[in-house]
Amino acid sequence: MAKIGIAVFPGSNCDRDVHHVLNSVVGVSAEYVWHTKDRLAGYDAMIIPGGFAYGDRLRAGIIAAHSPIMGEVKKLAKEGVPVLGICNGFQILVEAGLLPGALMMNDSLRFVCRWTSVVVKNNNTPFTNQFAKDQRFMLPVAHGEGRYVADSKTVRNLRTEGRVVFQYSGDDPNGSVDYIAGICNREGNVVGMMPHPERASEPILSPTGSSDALLVFKSLVSYLSGSSSTTTSTSTFSSFSPSHSSSHRPTRTAAIPAEKQV
Amino acid sequence: MTGTLTVDEFRYLKEKLSREPNSIELDIVGAEWSEHCSYKSSKKYVRMLPSKGKRVVIGPGYDAGVLDVGDGYVVTVHIESHNHPSAVEPFGGAATGVGGVIRDIMSMGTRPIAVLDALRFAPITQDGAKRTRTTGVGGKGRVLKSKWLFKNVVKGIADYGNCIGIPTVGGEVEFDPSFEDYCLVDVASIGFGRRDLLVKNAAEPDDIVVLAGGSTGRDGIHGASFASKALEGENRSAVQIPDPFLEKLLLEATIEAVDQKCVKAIKDLGGGGLACCLSEVSDSIGNGLDVDVAKVHARESGMSPAELMISESQERMLFITDDTGLEKLKAILEKYRIPYSILGSVRQNPDLVVRFNHDVVARMPFQLVAHAPLAERQAKRPHDFGRYVAVRPPALPKDLGKVLLAMLANPTIAGKGWIYSQYDHEVGVRTVVKPGPSDASVLRLDNGKFIAAKLDGNSKHCFLDPYAGTMGCLSESCRNIVCSGAEPIGIVDHLQFGNPEDPEIFWSFTQAVNAIIDYCKYMGIPVVGGKVSFYNETAKGPIKPSPVIGALGLIEQESWITKPALKDGDSIFVIGKTGDEMGGSEYYEWYHHITGGTVPSVDLHADKQNADAVMKLVRAGLVGCAHDCSKGGIAVALSEMAVHGKVGFDVNLDQLPGSCSRPDNLMFSESNSRYIIGTARPAELHSVLSGMDRISFAEIGTATGQRQKQSAKFSYKGRTLVSVGIADIESNLNDSLAKIMKQ
């Protein structure tokens, strides 16, 4: 059975929520991994949960990005292991150089917590394969620094390569460029998103009663069990097409050169 | 020299010690005997509050009240204020207020799962500031100052709660000129844990005293004494510095220590610092302590023993453990890299002994330190009490639709989205009913049950009649709980007044206490915790009496959870009588600038009967939606239900039970004990209510959902009195506060 690791930094505060959803709602085995751990053998996927790692000191995510566990996460990411960063986890992935761009203070200059709707732009990642393309669903954001920015070339590449995974739909909570709510790396195995799918995975928590955000985690389970209908290939990005779907779990291959060249 | 003690207190101390206290002892006693820590004016009264109940595991007196919610689980609750510091430094003051109440929950061995806040400021609009008590004319500067306080208090609460990852799930805000240059910041926290892991402070001689958390500095020196007199200057050194990241580490470490059963007693450091913490912990375990304050990890060098004892540096906890527990505790603290010091040990003698290196710098019986001599305060009914009752009612406004829209834009009534969207209210995946139009916030517990929580206050009612006003707050908070589908199971109270040495102010305090005793005894709801805060005044005078009531309710089944969203076609019922009780209403105060009139009273029998009826209807599945009627009356409550449900409504005011003489009073009266219910099964609801002995209720109209022409319609004496588009209602209700804060 697949084993999912949840990275816990001093100041992480959504670790327990992700743990609850994976173990009690999805029914897959997930365990906490303390940030000092410098060997991550045996984890089939890693989740970097939200919170305020190191109190967001200096800059959100920057200190956590340099902790021992992130060295290991980078290795796993290179091997093609699925990695999901949620909220502060997204900020950490960006600071660690696993994803391009930066997350800046919201344009309102205030922390914002509210439900919003996003649309799935890429349903071909380990975290979105159970969604329909362009599927809309509701989930909450809760962040002070969630405005995604990147230089125009990076943004253009993200768009043309289909690496914008989620976009805010109709309602932009933070002023992100291109309404970007989540992106992935070239290989598609590393995904970062500002909204919180773990908070929208049970009907009882959702103002509309919809728990479609659970598909983020179900996608992962499906990917790990090799039963996903649209599977990610990790070799080149061009393989991200529905026609390329296969029922086999892809082999982990070496990564494409660093994101900094994007 | 008596330090901060009065001459009588000094004499008492000297007599008990049979010697002159030294200056360090004076500082320790001065902190612990401050009004803030000792409750010397109020203790005699708050002891009379009913605190027993079938669910009460631990009542008032501990850091937090504890209620049994079944299946081996408990809920803990506590309320604190941080008024003086917030008035001087709103961001830090409010943030450390959150930090303090969270540590109280942790001290019981439970994990905090929610924060609620009740805030009071001077008006934030020119119009609202028109009637100030000083000049009668509103000033731009005054409005700017209260907006500055408001904005930064909210930011302080948000930053702290968001960072530590405890959702701020609800609250309440009131604006009134009596809070000019001041503010009230009340924060309540709810905890959840296993009953068998509760930490009940039982330690034995030779157990070890460990101080963990933030280093001790010179911030917050004399904070408790600062909060125990009127706010005169801006004493910033008495305000503490917040560090939510450290508190988060302390929280996780404390929970781990509790889970590993390696601590015997926990006490947070708050007002009065180590001085209060050590004397109170000593008193609660019934043994002496011998500590060396030179061992305290300090953030600045050269701190004197007295400074180390009374510093109120934040994010500190005291643990008592034994030899085997200490090793586990050290490992946990080191895992989180939390600094700690081993201060000393528990002793089988009656003394609190404080050393500095090897010198004994203070030695006093802990019982003497922990129990200040009570102050005898005089209570006198104000000579002009009642002068406000006989005011001339305002002329009936021509366009009550316009009045309704103005009422909805009143910052006290308008939607609080601007506030709660800055709070992470979702973290923890427990928030089932979120802040917003709902009456109470609802959180799910691990045993399949739900806890509902609400804070309520009404300084305008309490100013005109502290007894009726306080009882109204109790009724309102319980109505909110009932409307969410819950049964009230416990109350916490926060009683905030001016200088207790003023007999008229003290009289209003005794009235509030009497109201709580009478209400809670009649309803059978225990008071499980509370706090008293006096000296809430500035050079401009005292605040209006501002008791804030926190109510907790338990929902046994998911299907009982009830929200206030009207649905198309719902029949609208009102339970409870509407009267010409306009004193202190938002309609009089906000719209007409009238202070006076008869304050709504509570008919205890009707209040209980109506609440029981709603609970019965909810459980029978007959309630589609429910909402409490309070500030702004039925017109505001219906507007909120309509906006929430995206429908219009058509109601007939003539149907309202009660004896109201005017249409504006029917719309805006704040009479207590009233509920609005929307139902798709009117006949059944009718027959259940008809079977109850003389309960007042009526079907007053229906919710209408035609897309094109949704409107709020009130008819009176056969004609349409008000017809306002729901879009206008929605924008006034939802956008006003954000607009004001943008200006």
Image (tube, coloured by chain):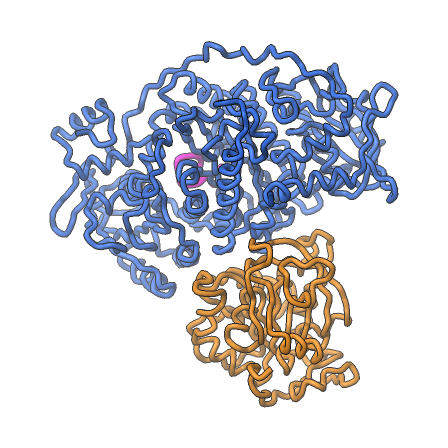
Chain colours: A orange, B blue
The one of A251 and B51 positioned closer to us in this rendering: A251
Quadrant location, the N terminus of chain B: top left
Can you see residue B54?
A: no
Quadrant location, the C terminus of chain B: top right
| Residue B724 x/y as whole percent | 80, 33
The one of B203 and B550 positioned closer to us in this rendering: B550
- Left or right of B398? Residue B164 is left
Compared to B244, does A219 lie above or below? below
Say how many tags the image has. Answer: 0
The one of B618 and A12 positioned closer to us in this rendering: A12
Identified at 49% across, 10% down, the residue is B384
- The verdict on residue B236 being magenta is no
Q: Quadrant of residue B31?
A: top left
The one of B708 and A13 positioned closer to us in this rendering: B708
- Left or right of B260? Residue B491 is right
- Left or right of A191? Residue B516 is left
Q: Quadrant of residue A37?
A: bottom left
Q: Which residues are magenta?
A: B56-67
| Residue B335 x/y as whole percent | 37, 65
- Left or right of B233? Residue B432 is right
Identified at 75% across, 29% down, the residue is B402
| Residue A214 x/y as whole percent | 68, 64
Q: Quadrant of residue B552?
A: top right
Identified at 61% across, 30% down, the residue is B127
